[in-house]
Amino acid sequence: MVTLEMTTKLDSPQIPNVETAMSRRYLKIAQKWFPTALSYFEDWTERPDCGHFFGGVHWYGIETATPLQALAAVSTSPEYDENTTGLSMGNLREIVIKSIRYLCFTHDTGPEECVRPDKGLGMPRSWGTKWGERGKGYFPESQCGPTIANMTTAALMLKPHVDDETILMLGNICLDYLDRFGEMEPKSGIYADTQMEENAWTALGLAACYLFLSEHERAGEWEENAKRWMYSACSAPQDRYNQGEIEPGVTVSRLTGKIFTTLPDYMAENHGMVHPGYTSSGVSSVGSLGRIYRMYGRTEPPHAYWNRQEVYNVIKHLTDFTGTPMPTQGMDRLYLGEQHELHSVAHLLLKDPDAGFFERVALDIREKTQESNKGKLIDPEISSKCHEVEDPMEIKESEMIHAISKPYLLHRMMDGEAPDPTTREEIQEKFNGVKLFPHSGFAFHRHTKGQTSLAWRNYVTALPWTREGVHTIGPSRWSMLAKVQVKDKPESHNLVTMRVNEKDDGFAALMENHRAQNSIRQRVLFASLPDGRILSSEKLHAREDCVVERVEQGFLRIINENFPLVEGNCDGQRKFYYPEDSKLFKGFPSTDPADDIIFDLNDPGWVNVDDRLGIVFRGSGETRYINRHYFPPFSFRAVADDLFLSITDEAHQFATGDLVGELTALVSPEQNNKDTPRERLVVAESTEDAVCMITDGFLCAGNFSKGRTLCSFEAGFNGPIPVFAGVARVNRHSAEYIVPLESGESVYLQELMKVVPNGDVRFESTHGGRIFLSNEDEQQVGVRIQREGKEEEVVVDVGGVLALS
């Protein structure tokens, strides 16, 4: 049992009694939110002076622990505003202490008869139970660590107003957690479900407990073990071979052992996908540890920083101009999250100036959306009608406030130590270009019109984001590339070929998968061009006789949220343009499936979404736009519509070798609807194993055959004919392009010129940049040449060759 002598001797936390420009912004959000929290506060009469928030029965006590920590944090402000919160300081402290006591009594260490209410918000399996999760295994038991951290730091912030009984109950909760995990080794896990987040929250729980019990004789022993948990939150396979010392006498290799939580490229994988949200947990953990250590007047150990900068380096490379890291393999949680906490930690503790820019971008959006929501963090219409993957949206308010209260305290503690934020222009210049993530399994291209990604592992997905990222396109799994349903053939995908041709300002990729228990061959040629446009060719063929029940290609989830105060996007409607007309689709949630609107088009050739995304395409199925309003329970990610460029939802019998579905598309981010139908998309003729697409300025080609091939592609044109690097044989209305390609190789070639010949000619370019024009006709040929904004006429005699330079 714990005695008062074992607990910390501090009478108050070490928080400067000042506000800063940034801390005031977080303070304002928190204080405006307090009336929402108070509307969910109830007294709990089973024991004296107890109460809870949001029903009191959510996962691990977080529904009460997170709000009480936020109230306690704001109670330390020298600029506390009772008029905004609706609470006197005395009433605020009373509510915080009641909440701590409620969680103490209903924890595993509390009296047996003290259980949580038998009904409330969230999962019914938590109703009428204790929290602490004793006997349920490592995952749920350890996840109580952050709840304990919120309780102990809140008690420290309210000293000396917290009574001895409550301090002792808190001490027993801490000792219970230390008894469970104080001697346990960290967990290892990379694929499918990383152990990054679990190791991070266990490290936080251990730190919170031994700091609160800092006078206990075993405090030093517990701290040494906790350091390894901190370190192992972001341990990578390459660390095993690092013989440098992290502290005197302790090498990185020894501390790592065989415990790894990040992929070698520093991304983390959770829920079966490379997941930026869970990758961010490693960086956020140093913020939680830094905040709690500094409140106790100490400095967080170096173990808390291990690989955090390396992890943040990949996160910020993926971050759009809303401050959101792009989920390149899809997202199974809310699309529009709270990212300002992540970036605040990187700015303040990692001293990363880029993080300062992203924090301010994300915080600006949060301030404006809260203003629209009249103090709430979630649109009340959404919270009353929608249910996220696990919980009703209503209870997410209790979770989201942590992204406000934690940066608030960090800014008060550390604002003077942070570098000046990077500018938007510097971000664009620094990160534009291509980055491959070979272990995660995706390519990422940042360009002047947005971001493009192609993923070939876990979920085969391509995403054409604008600069507004997730405010335009939702990161759904199976975006753009095929999702196929075959009778009696469960989903599977076996990667046969994957090769990326990476350039400084774009990439081309060739991929072959065998899908649905190897019954379907999927071939994809994909190029992200330097100007941000995308060329994509996908063909599905039957590898055996089968019945295909459904084929979806070119699926995109169109965000249709309403943020009235956020400029430029998400105004509660999307205008969908197609040949000769357009339709306006409103965005709002509903509880009635009949409110969904389904709009089908037969081979429109092009569509444009709200002057934000232009698409020229040819597909084997119908085009469908679903204006969604009803989101079934456990499915809500955002208010969003579904666009299918090509969908076939009737069963068809196919024989071996038959074409099951195809889609060729040119996607242009940030394109006006008037420009979309003017785009050129040409599919050149070739053999079955070679693919070629041509658009204004570029040719993209790929070779699926087994050996190196001089691939020949023939295409017809009306008007000037483009010439690209390599060999082009051109006549009045067509061209043959000869491109040497290795097996599995893909390329994109930039246009050298446009030509109008009056006979048969041949163009050949050399690696040195020279271009030779040959006459292959039986008579003299004149050629009009357009390049670099200029036009010239040349004449080539029979059998003649001209050097064009």
Image (spheres, grey):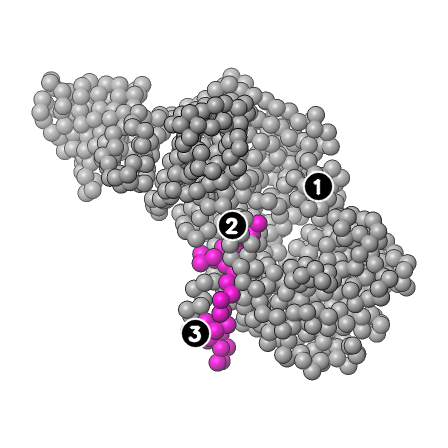
- Locate the N terminus by quadrant: bottom right
Q: Amino acid type of disc 2?
A: Val
Q: Secondary structure at mark 3?
A: loop
Q: Could you give the CA–CA distance between mark 2 and mark 3, rounded to whole angstroms? A: 29 Å
**Front residue (pair 769, 325):** 325
Q: Amino acid at mark 1?
A: His
- Tell me if I can see residue 624 in this picture: yes
Q: Residue at x 61, y 53 (%)?
A: 340
Q: Which numbered dot is residue 584?
A: none
Give how far across and how far down residue 337 sits, in percent.
62, 48
Q: Which residue carries the number 3 mark?
A: 244
Circle 3/circle 1 CB separation < 8 Å: no
Mark 1, residue position: 387
Decide if residue 415 is in sight here: no
Give the image location of residue 584, x and y in percent. 61, 24
- Foreground: 188 or 422? 188
| Magenta extent | 245-271
Q: Amino acid at mark 3?
A: Gly
Mark 1 burial class by Cα count in 10 Å: few <14, some 14-19, many 20+: many
Say above or below: 85 vs 475. Answer: below
Residue at (35% x, 25% y) in the render: 682
Classed neighbour count for the residue bearing mark 3: other residues with Cα under 10 Å, few (<14), some (14–19), many (≥20): some
Q: Secondary structure at mark 2?
A: strand
Q: Secondary structure at mark 1?
A: loop
Query: Is residue 84 rendered to the left or right of residue 442?
Result: right
Determine which residue is flagged by label 2.
274
Question: Dot 2: few (<14), some (14–19), or many (≥20) neighbours within 10 Å?
Answer: many
What is the distance, in whole Å, between disc 3 and disc 1 at their CAs?
Answer: 48 Å
Q: Quadrant of residue 448?
A: top left
